[in-house]
Amino acid sequence: MKKVFVFIISVLLLSVAVVFFVSCSKIPIFASIELEVKLKKPSLPATVRGVCKIGSKLYAANGSVYTKSPGNTGKWSKISSPVDAVCFSIATDGSSLYATFVDHYSDKGKGVYKYNGSSWSYVSGSDGIQAVIGSGTKVYGIKTSISYDSLKTIESGKMYAISGSTATFFKDMDTFQKEVQGTSRKNTYVHHIKASGNGYYATEKGLFDSSGNKISGAPSGIKVIDSTGTYFLTSDKVYKLNNWSSGVSHSVSNPSGAVVLTFSGKTRLLISSESSGYAEVLIDTGNFANSTSISIGSANSTTPSGQASQYKSSVGSHSCNCIFADTTGGGSGYFVYLGINDSNYGKYTGLWGFYNPGQLEWNRE
């Protein structure tokens, strides 16, 4: 009898432990089951390096390039690569897609390729370029090289302006230095491009326009520029172009991207976070100084109150390296994408989407 009693107690304790674990777990799959959200099989797994829209097509990259139509909740379709290499980055000037490809083993840049919606063509002068950045009207190419001496490692960079099918040298820049100081090392970013949008780009030295001229009065420490080149983000504030004196606070830890979405007569700035999920700022288009941060699930949020809990227990708890949003149905609906990086063995890494209407839940793409 004693053995039976001990067995029953053991089973009860195990049951309690399992219930406790499941109820307290923050792993997205449990939260999704609890909220009856069936996760899709991802068509865009792995780290997503960017999403952009050109005309009636969306493009995304995760080592390869994929496409689908805006508002479509279905799978993404893979586009054949022009070379046997990994797609490292994508960017657009508003009419064409530009992508860089790097060697699988050496990380050497294979150059920039332009996609016209049906075929790829090589961008002349782009040999060795590893990354493209920018959106709106201007795309830049970045090519880096590394040199060493006994005390210092210097990563030097060259910046190229890309227009049409040609890449033209734009500027030399020392981007990164690693110095040995006794038993310690000092990392110094000298002129490292941190953000770009609509021709503007930011480095540790300030904000610059498409001609390379420094913008007077702009704040230091700009980390993100939205694709329209209107809003500029530091670690704690949002600034509007040529309105540098009245920054508006935002709630994002380590911003990684930003996109403007106007829906139902209101303009929002959606900001992705390298720490967790995204946040929103409701923009007062009449008086920018009156713009305010809003909470996910609030009245004007792109994630409604009924889906806030599911957001927080899934994508809201993971690092987000990119964000994209746009309207659908002539402005009657919208969708939001987040590029998620999951530190839990990468199980949930990939692109996630929310569609209103069509898919009122955060789910894998």
Image: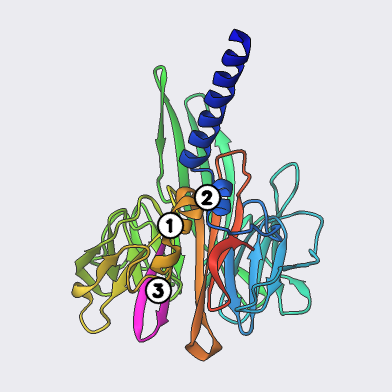
Identify residue type, mark 3: Gly
Residue under the image location 80 percent in, 60 percent down: 83
Residue 155 drawn above or below residue 150: below
User: In the rendering, at what x and y percent does residue 40 appear?
Assistant: 67, 60
> Residue 245's quadrant in the figure?
bottom left
Per the rendered image, the range of residues in magenta is 260-271
Q: Residues within 10 Å of mark 1 (few under 14, many from 20)?
A: some
> Residue 288's quadrant in the figure?
bottom left
264 falls in the magenta region: yes
Identify residue type, mark 2: Ala
> Residue 307's quadrant in the figure?
bottom left
Q: Are marks 2 and 1 in contact (CB under 8 Å)?
A: yes
Q: Secondary structure at mark 2?
A: helix
Residue under the image location 79 percent in, 63 percent down: 81
Q: Which residue is mark 2?
A: 31
Q: Which residue is mark 3?
A: 229
Between 43 and 288, the one lying in front of the other is: 43
Q: Which residue is mark 1?
A: 309
Residue under the image location 63 percent in, 75 percent down: 58
Q: Residues within 10 Å of mark 3 (few under 14, many from 20)?
A: many
Residue 70 tag number = none
Between 90 and 144, the one lying in front of the other is: 90
**The C terminus appears in which quarter of the rendering?**
bottom right
User: In the rendering, at what x and y percent does residue 243 appear?
Assistant: 23, 73
Q: Which secondary structure dominates the residues rendered in magenta?
A: strand
First reached walking from the N terminus: tag 2 or tag 1:
2
First reached walking from the N terminus: tag 3 or tag 1:
3
Mark yes or no: residue 212 visible.
no
Mark toward the viewer: 3 or 2: 2
User: In the rendering, at what x and y percent does residue 277 appear?
Assistant: 45, 55
Identify residue type, mark 1: Ser
